[in-house]
Every structure is written in C-alpha cells, then in structure tokens.
Image: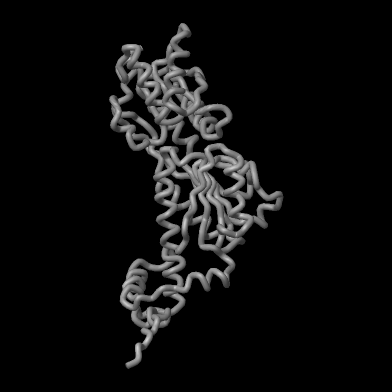
Amino acid sequence: MTNEVPKQATIEDVAKLAGVSIATVSRAIRKPEKVAESTRKKVTAAIARTGYTANAMAQNLRMRRSQMVLVLTGSIADPNFAGVLTGMEKIANARGYGVLIGSTEGNIPIEEKYMGFLSTGMVDGLLLTTGHLPVAGWPKLPMQSLPPVVAVGRPVESDDVCYVGVDDVTAAKVATEYLVSLGHRKIAYISGGTPDILSDMRHEGYRLGLSEASAKLQDWRIESDGTSEGGRSAVERLFIKDTLPTAFFCFNDNTAIGVISALQLRGYNVPRDFSVVGFDDILFSKDITPALTTIRQPRAKIGEDAMTKLLDLIADRQSPQSDRLFHGDLMVRESCAPSQS
C-alpha cells in the first residue's frame, strides 16, 4: 500500500472553480480593493474549497520584498494610535502584508535600531506617526533610493513624503466658530506645546475662526504640553491674571479634560461658567462629566488610506502620491453653553 501525497492546489484550480482568469485570482489576492466585491467573494470561496495557499516566500524572493512594513511611533500610549493602527492592519492583511510596530518613546538609540530594518531590507516601507524624519540612522541618500515613506497623523518636513491626516486647520476653525456662535468673545486656545506642528496648525484654525467673527476677537494662546496635567496648569496660570476667558478651545481631549478638572476643583460649573472644546474624540471623552464637545478624527480611515498609499508606492515607485486630509466632525455634547457675559 502506498501513501500518495495529496496534490497541492494551484492558482489554476482556483481560477477554474471561480470561473475567472488566473490574473483575476492573482489580483484578488494581492490587490483585493481593485476587484469587484462579487468576484472577490467567488475567488475567496474557491480558495477555501481548494485549500490553495500562495507560495509567498518564493514570490517575495523573486520580487525582493519582505512583505512587511514598519510603523514608527513616538508612543503606543497615544490615544489616537490604536484606531489608526486598526485601519492600517485591515489594509495590510487584505494585501498580504505584515506590520511591525516600533515605539521610540523619543529615544534616539531605539529609533536607530528600527531604522536598521530599512537598510537591511527587513521591511519594504515605513509609516511615520512621529511628525519628523528619523533623527538617527536615517541614510544620507536621496529619498528616491530609499524604501517608500508615508507620514500619518503628523506631517513631516519633506516634499518627498506624502501625508495622511485630518484637516487640522479647518477643524479647529469649525470648533472656534461654534464657540463664537454661542456668544463667546473671550476664547483661550490651550496649545499642545512648542514646537508642535499640529498645535500650530490648530492655532491657525483658531485664529481663522476668530478673524471671521463679527467682532474683532483677541488671539489668546496659552502654552501647554498636550497632557491633562498641562491643561490643569494652564488654568491655574490664567487665574493669576485679571481677565479670564469664557471659553476654552484645547489642543486635544487630554488637555480639555485637565481644563475641566481644574475649573471644577475651583468650584466652577462647566458649561454654565465656562465652555470647553477638545480635539480628537478619544474613547472616554463622552464618558466624563460633562461629556466633552470635541472634534472627531476618522482614525481608522486615516490608517486605511495611509497603508493603501504606502503599499501602492511599494508596488509602483513611480506612482504619484498626494497628501490626503480628512474632514474632522464637530461632536456637540454637554461641555458648551451660551456665554453668560
């Protein structure tokens, strides 16, 4: 009696069962977003029935690709990161890529270690959420000779790196105009630190919102650091002065939560005495008291678009890529009310 080795299913078997061409099967595996949903379902069902698995290792060797991408972030504790990563992994998984996550925590040696992945070919591309090109280990070569790079959430200072994120200027303008519409004329902007490109862009939107108001309003920027403790400290510094705002537009939700906490500790009621708006719509922003009015970022969509751009660049280095800015939605909740002054 002989033990026959079962015949391994081929891509031809899948194509025949699905009633499509071999090229369509290949496209459905490698670039499913470019195949009609009905066709994709037929191919997926045929793959399941035949047990076909693509020889990814051989394919990668031929194409000199690792089928891995690196996501470099300042901190995985960033409340926006998980949502963006979910979108990234959705696209990466659909297109047969794996994702490595490098959290630098601002440590240059750690950043340098992760950058070694690029020079050794361990990853095919880089998604940057840090807001800067890597300080350490960045090859002193033209960008065209390096693996593809896409900035996510925070733009970087390079014309060769496209950016995917929310339209911070327009969203901040909308938030400020909402406070103006409630009758507020003394609106403070609590920043996210200096230097911080996102904080500066949101400050620009705040200024635009003030400038388009019917009355000339004061640009009132209070420096902070993007943390809840920084928000509390900003409020304490304000109370040393003779004049107080009636509303706060904050760089992010963490800052806004700190502002609300400091005001409540002083015995004030939000929103009766002061209105507060945040930015990001992090997970628990609606669960605090009062529920926070804020700008919602479409985190998953940002991650999906960024990964799509990166993988398209990996597939075709000549493919033109432009920045993509998503609309931020104003989520009106309980932390704002008409001005009483």
Residue at 60 percent of width and 49 percent of height: 115
Question: Where does residue 16 sit, x and y in percent of width and height?
Answer: 37, 83
Name the residue rendered at 51%, 59% in the picture: 68
* Residue nearest the observer in this picture, 212 or 197: 197
Q: Position of residue 192 (x, y in %)?
A: 50, 28
Q: Quadrant of the C terminus?
A: top left
Image x and y of residue 278, in percent: 40, 29
Residue 89 drawn above or below residue 247: below
- Residue 315 placement, left or right of 214: right
Q: What colour scheme was applied to this rendering of the protein?
A: one colour
Instruction: Please give the name of the residue rendered at 31% of the width and 20% of the height, measured from the top-left corner.
Output: 271
On the image, which quarter does residue 339 sit in? top left
Q: Which image quadrant is residue 328 in?
A: top left
Front-lying residue, 70 or 254: 70
- In this rendering, is residue 179 above or below 78? above
Q: Looking at the picture, how far across and down is residue 38, in whole percent?
A: 33, 69
The quarter of the image holding the N terminus is bottom left
Q: Is residue 222 visible?
A: yes
Q: How many numbered badges does the structure rendering display?
A: 0
Report the residue that reaches farthest toward the top. 242
Question: Quick check: can you spot residue 323?
Answer: no
Q: Is residue 248 above or below residue 302?
A: above
Name the residue at 31% across, 76% down. Answer: 49
- Taking the view exactly as shown, the residue that stands out farthest to the front is 1
| 94 up-or-down from 102: above or below | below
